[in-house]
Amino acid sequence: MFSQRRYNHFSVEISYGFNIPAIPRNNILIPDYILPNHLDIGIRYMFDEYFGLKAHYANDRFRNKSDKKIGNGYHRLGFEAVYNLSNRLNLFNNNFNLLFHAGIGITHAYPETIKRFENGGKFTFDLTPYGTKRYERIGNIILGLKPMFRYSNDLAITLDAVYVLNSQQQYAYNGELLYKNRKKIQGGFINFTVGIHFYLGRERRHADWYNNGRKY
């Protein structure tokens, strides 16, 4: 049955948009950090018209609008499951779609306080960094909803709303230590992006637009 389903499975996606700090809010005003500083690139494989897997790289730069030297830089690799809600629930017509995606990731964060210390400045609370690492490693849980708008058989325009939960973080979004005792806490932030999906393959349609035998 699988071999008789004539649709493409692979797609490549690129998105750009905003990152918004949520928690913790230590020593920051959230509006000062809402900037279009998020970029992600991914590849997705759909096993059928409902379920697939996605791998991605994401870059988030948290910067203060008034002083770009204040901030933190995140580099994340993620692996997610993808489920086509509109195919399952018949929510939309042949030009609209809705994907749910969720998974895990690993982030390397590069706080500005470490860079400042390496350049002869003071570390937060007049402490010194542990070891010689220039980054903080953070585990992530990723949850998102992605509306899709079909432009052609080879291209779709997307919106994406994503919440990224940080398992434990020691540095704030302004790049400074959260606490003098170096306590680690859970955190999280939001991404709102606009993107493009490029469909790969020789068939006329992709699995995103194939529902119970109907090729949209």
Image (cartoon, rainbow, N blue to C red):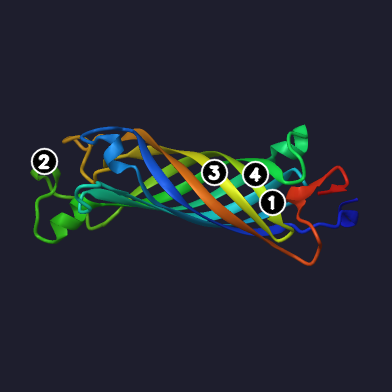
Along the line of sight, the residue nearer the viewer: 168 or 201: 201
Residue at image position (41%, 50%) is 107
Q: What element carries label 3?
A: strand
Q: Which residue matches tag 2?
A: 125
Q: What kind of residue is marked 3?
A: Asp
Residue 110 image offset from top left, x and y in percent: 29, 53
Q: Which residue matches tag 4?
A: 82
Are there few (<14), some (14-19), or many (20+) residues within 10 Å of tag 4? many
Q: Quadrant of residue 5?
A: bottom right
Q: Which residue matches tag 1?
A: 150
Q: Which residue matches tag 3?
A: 160
Earlier-in-chain disc, 4 versus 1: 4
Q: Distance between the residues labelled 1 and 2?
A: 52 Å
Are there few (<14), some (14-19), or many (20+) residues within 10 Å of tag 2? few
Q: What kind of residue is marked 4?
A: Val
- Of badges 4 and 3, the one in the foreground is 3
- Of badges 4 and 2, the one in the foreground is 4
